[in-house]
Image (cartoon, rainbow, N blue to C red):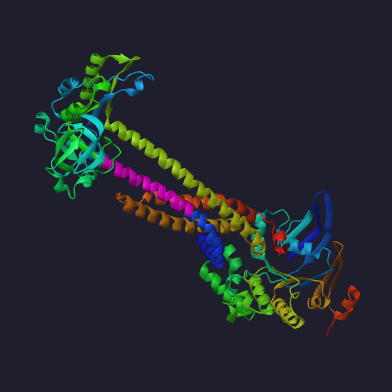
Amino acid sequence: MNFTEGFRESYETIRHNKLRTFLTMLGMNIGVASVIAVMATGLMGRGAIMKGIENIGSSLLWVQANRDAYPPGRDITYMKPEDLAALEGIVRDAWISPNLRGTYMIGSRGYQEAATAYGVWQPYMRIWGRAVQAGRFISQEDVDLRRRVIVLGRNTAKVFFSTEDDALGKSVAMGGKDFRVVGVMAKKERSPVDDGSDDDTAYVPYEVLQDITNWDAYGGPRVLRVYFKVHALSDLDFVSSQASQYLGQRYGAVEGKPRFVVRKAEDSIQTTNKVFDIITTVITLIAGISLVVGGIGIMNIMLITVTERTKEIGIRKALGAKRRDILAQFLIESVIICLIGGGIGIIFGVGITAVVSVVQRWEYLLPWLSILIGLAVSISIGLFFGIYPALKAARLDPVVALTKE
Amino acid sequence: MILLESIVKIYRMGKLEVPALMGVNLGVQEHEFVAIMGPSGSGKSTLMNIIGCLDRLTTGRYVLDGIDVSQMSDNELADVRNRKIGFVFQTFNLLPRMTSLRNVELPLIYEGASKKERRERALEALRLVGLENRALHRPNELSGGQRQRVAIARALINRPAIILADEPTGNLDSRTGEEIMAVFQELNDRGVTVILVTHELDIALCARRVVAIRDGLVTRDEEITDRKMVAAAAGLGGGSIP
């Protein structure tokens, strides 16, 4: 029996058993659709992450206390404000900013709102690729003159002022001091590599925040992190080694490990990628289970079909059908059911992917690879789960099959 | 055409051995019209299955159209069935979802004939049994007699060496049965070898030779010259024989 005839026969059988075939196909639909949706969504998500990474760039690194090196209960050593000058001196061609963080109540016109205040230098905005919605960010002059100016996060500004522009020039109270609002930040997009700030954050000059912070409980001022964004990628390793060397000489080691570490944005990117990979793989595997379930459904229905059509098989054998003819007929049938089921699943999967891309505002990528994999998997399932019923049919004894009613 | 020598067929059911044929010798020449008769359990169905290459014999030799088929593989037997034998069954055994034309074409599909050739030969075979105007009807749109004619057309399509009919009138009323027997007689007149298996004497008497089987052995083998005499000799009671 050639393929054309096999397809024709299968088409007739499937048409004759529409409901049953449809129900059997559902398993394949769901399985293929979910595998494609998961794979394609993963791909798009990674694309979105990569785009976020491009904004920040791989030329970013920062220095921070090596918390993992300390045994539990031991006080952690932080950098001191005096270290800033030395760290700043390592590289000329870079944007540098320390970072201090504290939660404060911000008040204005009788309202109070909690916000995380970031004490930073002027390059901070460019290091993280942020933008202001209104006004300006903290300037070098503000830093030099220790001006009490503040740039409000989008949400914080909304609490006190009707519009962003309305906030400019107004005064807010924080930590018992008055600050003049010079800017409001633009909406912050999510990104896998992040400084932890959000729309509830307010920015003030680093030295100003340091001055209003009560350091009594901490034994003097400390610097949490220092960010470097080098302009030449080749400087990255140099900055990293120089910073480590300087801090190592000054503070020594703890338990044989350095007290400070240098982290590169690129490392975070790779970690994020790895986590993403694992999540995608695990979910794909789980979705793949539904494919196996679908395949068992196919096998079940093919076994029923073979039993129902034993007499037909007997007739065909009497008329000269060889084992391979019967085998081909039933294999083609199960592959066709799987292909139709998988095809519908692919359409659904692509549709789900499109919806996700719209909702998440990810760039839409037509998942060609997933579609090909979906088709290949459909055919394989048709063959794998169809072979046993088809063999059973092919091996039927013609005399026995013919006498069956 | 057909030569059966000391055919023995033993069925194994677990440890039990059930002999169905115990040394059958039979020869059928080209253009013959032979009826094989016997009560149920006599072994005539087994004999038919062996002649039709559906089943294998335990010992003995079977030569069909000059070829020894006793030791053939499953695939070779399928080929022999396809090319040398045309089956006509009591229950017609048409595939219900297919048109008459497709049903008649079926053996040619397994032979590997082209679509065009299949169509032409199937229409020709349907014309031969007078059903060319029913080519696109499905079996459930046909009467019993018409179904059996479609089955006969299917049996003829590969120009087989023999037509093997197993109780072909068993599911038909007597008038339609006579019509079907007339078709076989006409085919035989045109030179087709026909072997008929039946337990009805008046059907058997349409043939030119009657072979009686009982307990796995051929008990009688006679040319029909005088129909009444054969009936009496067969001991199967008279029929409504003209």
* Quadrant (top left, top right, bottom left, bottom right) of the N terminus of chain A: bottom right
Horizontal side of residue A78 vs A372, given as left or right: left
Task: Say which of A104 and B101 sits in front.
Answer: A104
Instruction: Locate residue B185, reporting x and y percent.
Output: 73, 78
Residue A315 found in image quarter: bottom right
Residue A365 seen: no
Give the image location of residue B104, x and y in percent.
61, 71
Q: Residue at x 52, y 68 (%)?
A: B115
From the top left corner, tell me how far across and down residue A241 is, in percent.
23, 21
- From this viewpoint, which residue is outermost toward the front? A110
Q: Nearer the viewer, residue B187 or A331?
A: A331
| Residue at the extreme bottom of the image, as rendered | B242
* Chief SS of the magenta region: helix
Tell which of A103 and B44 is nearer to you.
A103
Q: Is residue A224 above or below residue A21?
A: above
Q: From where the camera sits, is residue B11 visible?
A: yes
Q: Is residue A62 highlighted in magenta?
A: no
Position of the C terminus of chain A by quadrant: bottom right
For residue B134, what is the image quadrant?
Answer: bottom right
Query: Percent position (x, y) of residue A338?
Result: 50, 56
In depth, the one of A30 and A326 nearer the eye is A30
Number of callouts? 0
Q: Taking A268 as reference, is B31 above or below it?
A: below
* Left or right of residue B153, residue A371 in this image: left
Q: Quadrant of residue A23?
A: bottom right
**What residue sits 58% from the left and 53% below the top?**
A299
**Range of magenta residues:** A30-52
